[in-house]
Image (cartoon, helix red, strand yellow):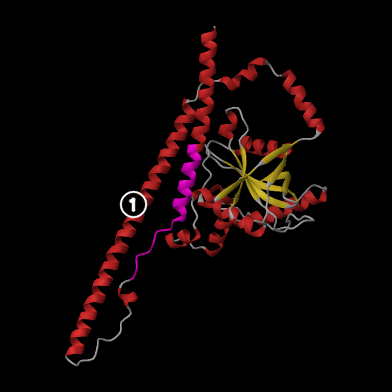
């Protein structure tokens, strides 16, 4: 299966279409509450620890709003299941949904994440495949760890137009990325999400809230945060180590390139001097040589992985910032309550 480890296979047999223009950007995502519950249930049934679960999003596009009305999971399978065809499985599922009059148009995919660790090359390749085939497609990232802390963590992302162009050209060299003027902050764009429920479901939620005990509501004031914060900082340090290794590789490439340029310049100077001496003696100049064959430039390291690492570091920092700010608020509240008593 896709990018649990590699990438998601895309079936474009059912593509979302609207009465408007297909080239209009998606400015808002409307998700049915049933879809959110299915994603959460999928992780609870099949996700274990850092295991990633994925699935397909179905719906339609209305003007600049993407409406996600249904979804279905990718089944768990091992590498031994060589006969399993993901594209065929998706097509059969969408065909079955169409037969029972349920929205079956493909509008993207979803994936769970472990402590916000989702910025990777596999996700980039999968989303590029989706967005290249279905322009309005998005990827939903569900964070069960943050959700367990008391608030639903569900975000929608799309690749920016700049990154789409770079992926189409497959030019991930330092010069290509510099020419495109793209940084880690310009790789993904977040799309705002609105969760929609029917009136009957809203009434049911009000009844459940009235029946909930006071003790359940106070769980949000839990002051323990060491485990979550410690794990986030550990993942952040691992990514910083990866970044430092990439910086060392790039610095080594820069030194080798500079050294070769100096050798090339010295060789051209010696050749010019020798040709000048031969000309003064009335001898013909030296034959022309392909200098690029003599001084082959070193292979530049790919910079896309470095950008992804930088993006993941930024994501970890944002998560730590949000988490610590919430806990500081709880600590100040607890201090005020203790002083009042």
In the figure, is residue 197 to the left or right of 120? right
Give the answer, above or below, for where 43 lies relative to 77. above
| Residue 79 visible from this viewpoint | no
- The foreground one among 283 and 164 is 283
Magenta span covers which residues?
Answer: 296-317
Q: Position of residue 81 (x, y in %)?
A: 59, 52
Name the image quarter holding residue 265.
bottom left
The local crowd at label 1, few if under 14, some if 14 to 19, many if 20 or more residues have their Cα within 10 Å, is few
Residue 252 image point, x, y percent = 31, 56
Q: Is residue 207 left or right of residue 77?
A: right
Q: At which x and y percent is residue 184?
A: 49, 49
Q: Is residue 269 above or below residue 83?
A: below
Image quarter in which the C terminus is found: top right
Furthest toward the top, the residue is 341
In the rendered image, the residue lying farthest to the left is 281
Whether the magenta-drawn stretch holds residue 306 is answered as yes
Which residue: 59% across, 34% down? 144
Number of marks present in the image shown: 1
The residue at which mark 1 appears reads as 248
Q: Which residue is rendered at x = 47% and y = 59% of the image?
A: 177
Judge whether residue 302 can be spotted in this image.
Answer: yes
Left or right relative to 127: residue 234: left
Magenta stretch: dominant secondary structure: helix
Q: Secondary structure at mark 1?
A: helix
- Considering only vertical position in the picture, is 22 above or below 50? below
* Residue at left offset 43%, top offset 58%: 302
């Amino acid at each position: 299966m896709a990018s649990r480890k590699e990438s998601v296979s895309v079936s474009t047999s059912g593509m979302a279409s609207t009465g408007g223009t297909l080239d209009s950007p998606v400015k808002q995502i409307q998700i049915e509450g049933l879809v959110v519950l299915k994603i959460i249930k999928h992780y609870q049934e099949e996700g274990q620890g850092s295991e990633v679960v994925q699935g397909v999003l179905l719906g339609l596009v209305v003007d600049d709003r993407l409406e996600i009305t249904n979804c279905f999971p990718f089944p768990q399978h091992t590498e031994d299941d060589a006969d399993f065809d993901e594209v065929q499985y998706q097509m059969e599922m969408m065909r079955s949904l169409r037969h029972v009059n349920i929205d079956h148009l493909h509008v993207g995919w979803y994936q769970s994440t472990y402590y916000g660790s989702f910025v990777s090359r596999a996700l980039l390749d999968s989303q590029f495949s989706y967005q290249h085939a279905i322009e309005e497609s998005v990827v939903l990232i569900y964070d069960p760890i943050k959700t367990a802390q008391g608030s639903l963590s569900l975000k929608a992302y799309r690749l920016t137009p700049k990154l789409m162009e770079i992926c189409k050209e497959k030019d991930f060299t330092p010069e290509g990325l510099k020419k495109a003027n793209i940084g880690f902050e310009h790789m993904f764009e977040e799309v705002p999400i609105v969760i929609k429920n029917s009136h009957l479901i809203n009434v049911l939620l009000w009844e459940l809230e009235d029946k909930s005990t006071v003790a359940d509501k106070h769980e949000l004031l839990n002051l323990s945060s060491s485990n979550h914060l410690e794990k986030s900082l550990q993942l952040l340090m691992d990514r910083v180590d990866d970044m430092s290794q990439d910086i060392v590789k790039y610095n080594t490439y820069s030194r080798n390139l500079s050294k070769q340029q100096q050798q090339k310049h010295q060789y051209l100077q010696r050749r010019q001097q020798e040709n000048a001496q031969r000309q003064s003696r009335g001898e013909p100049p030296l034959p022309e040589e392909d200098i690029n064959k003599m001084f082959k430039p070193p292979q530049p390291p790919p910079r896309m992985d470095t950008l992804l690492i930088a993006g993941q570091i930024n994501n970890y920092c944002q998560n730590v910032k949000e988490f610590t700010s919430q806990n500081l608020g709880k600590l100040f509240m607890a201090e005020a309550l203790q002083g009042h008593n």
